[in-house]
Image (tube, rainbow, N blue to C red):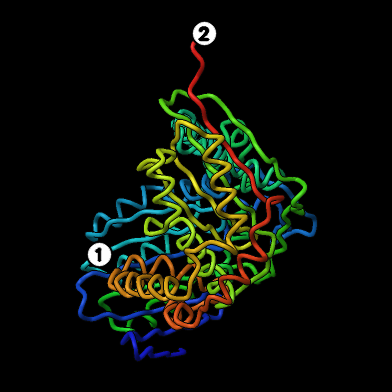
Amino acid sequence: MNKVYYEALNETVYTEVLENGLTVILIPKMNYSKTYGIFTTNFGSIDNQFVPINGDEEIKIPDGIAHFLEHKLFEGEEHDAFEDFAKYGASANAFTSFTRTSYLFSATDNIKENTTSLLDFVQDPHFTPEGTEKEKGIISQEIRMYDDNPGWQLFYGLLRNLYPQHPLSVDIAGTVESIQAITPELLQTCYDTFYHPSNMNLLLIGHFEVEEMSALIKDNQGSKQFLPAKQILRRLPEELAADIIAYKETEMDVLRPKVMLGVKGMELGLTGNEAEKFKIEGNLLLELLFGRGSKNFIALYDSGLIDDSYGYSFSFDRSFHFMAIESDTAEPKVLEEKIKHILLNWQSDGNLTSEKLELLKRSMIGEQLQAFNSLEYIANHYSSMIFSGAELFEIVPIIEKITMEDISRFAESYIDEKRMSTYVIVPKKVK
C-alpha cells in the first residue's frame, strides 16, 4: 500500500491497486465521527459507443443506459440495497454524470458492514425483463419532469448547439424514446464492460483503522470472480468548430427571456495535474472577466441587462470542456453582444491585472482549504480526479503558481468567435 503524507494539509492518503484491478484509496480522519464511502466507475452517459469486454465488434447503446444501470443496481434479487444500509444506520445514494457513476454511503457506526454492503450490492447485479420494463416507466416520468424546466432546457439547448454530434447533447437520463430500447442483455453488457474492478475505484474517508479496512476490502474482493481485465475501447464522434450551431432560440412559459452563451474548447486529451491547471485557468479567467467584483459585472447589472439569475461556469471533463455565461434579461440580443464583446476584447480589459489575479487566487485557495473540511467534498472530487491521474491535495500549489501570463495564454487559445454559441428561451407569444 502506497502512503503519501501532505504536510501542509496534515492529510495522509493510502492507495493500493488490488489483484483484480480495483484502486482503493483510504484517507483516515480519526478526529471525525463520520465515515464516507464512494464506489465509482469510469462510465457515464457519453460512453455510448464501445467494444464490449467479451467481444471484438464495436456497439452503440441507447442514450441513458448508464443512468438506467445506476437505478437497477439498487434493486437486489430479494430486497432493495437501501434496506441494508438502513439496517446499519447509514444513508446511501448514487449519481450518474456525463463520465462517471458513483454509489455512496455515510455513517457514524458499522463502517465495516456498510463498506461490505456497498461493495456487494454494486458487484451483484440482477437484470430481469420485468424489472427493466418497470424501470422504463419510472425513468420516463423523471425525464418528463424536466421537459418544462426552463433552466434545464437552456443548458441542454446550449449543449446541442455546441455539440450537435456528441452524446453530451443528450440528457444524462436519455430520452423517453431512447430508454425503450434498453434490455437486460444490454445492461449486462455495459455492466461487464464498465463495472470491471479495473475501471473502478473505492474511496473511504473518515473514522476507521487503515489496516483493518484494507484487509476487509481485500477479503471481499478476493472472494469474487471477474472476467480478465481488458482495455476499454470507447469511441466519440469527431468534433469540429464548423459543426457548432451559432444561435438558436425557443419559446417556453417564462416571464423574461433567458440567455446562455457558451465557448467550446477544442484542446482535448489533457490529463493529471496539467488538466487541473487548465481547469483552474479557465475558472480564473471567467472570474476576472465576469465575476461580481469586476467592472463588467457592475456595468451589466447597472444597465439592467442582467439580474440575480446571472451566472458563469467552466465545465471540464474527459473529452469535453466549455465556458458558459447566462442570465435572464429583457434584451437578449443586447446581452449576447455585450458578453461577446467582453470575451473578444479580453486583451484590453482592465480587469485582467496581476494584482486582481493574486486576490482571486488567495480567495480560491481559501475556499479550497475550507472545502477540505468536508468529507463529502474530498471523496467526490478525489475519486473523480484519480481517473485522470490528478491529485486533489496538490491543487493549492497549482493555484499558487498560476501567473497572468498563464491566463493570457489560456485566453489566446480559447476565446474564438467561431467556437461561440448562444441559446435563448423567450416567452411564448400570445395568440
Query: Can residue 333 be spotted in the picture?
Result: yes
167, 227: nearer the viewer: 167
Where, by quadrant of the figure, is residue 8 drawn?
bottom left
Which sits earlier in the primary sequence, circle 2 or circle 1?
A: 1
Q: Amino acid at mark 2?
A: Lys
Callout 1 amino acid = Ala
In this orientation, which residue lies closer to the viewer: 204 or 285?
Answer: 285
Residue bearing mark 2: 431
Can I make out residue 127 in this image?
A: no
CA gap, disc 2 to disc 1? 56 Å
Task: Measuring from the top left, give residue 367's x and y in whole percent.
Answer: 33, 69
From the top left corner, tell me how far across and down residue 63 is, in percent.
62, 42
429 is higher (above) or lower (below) than 120: above
Check whether the beta carbons of the residues at disc 2 and disc 1 lie within 8 A of each other. Answer: no
Residue 85 drawn at (x, y percent): 29, 57
Q: Residue at x 40, y 70 (%)?
A: 360
Say whether residue 361 is left or right of residue 10: right
Q: Which residue is mark 1?
A: 107
Tag count: 2
Residue appearing at x 60%, y 64% in the figure: 347
Give the structural element (helix, strand or loop) at label 1.
strand
Question: Viewer-proximal residue, 60 or 130?
Answer: 60
Q: Point out the residue furthest to the right here.
A: 57
The residue at 74%/51% (across/down) is: 241
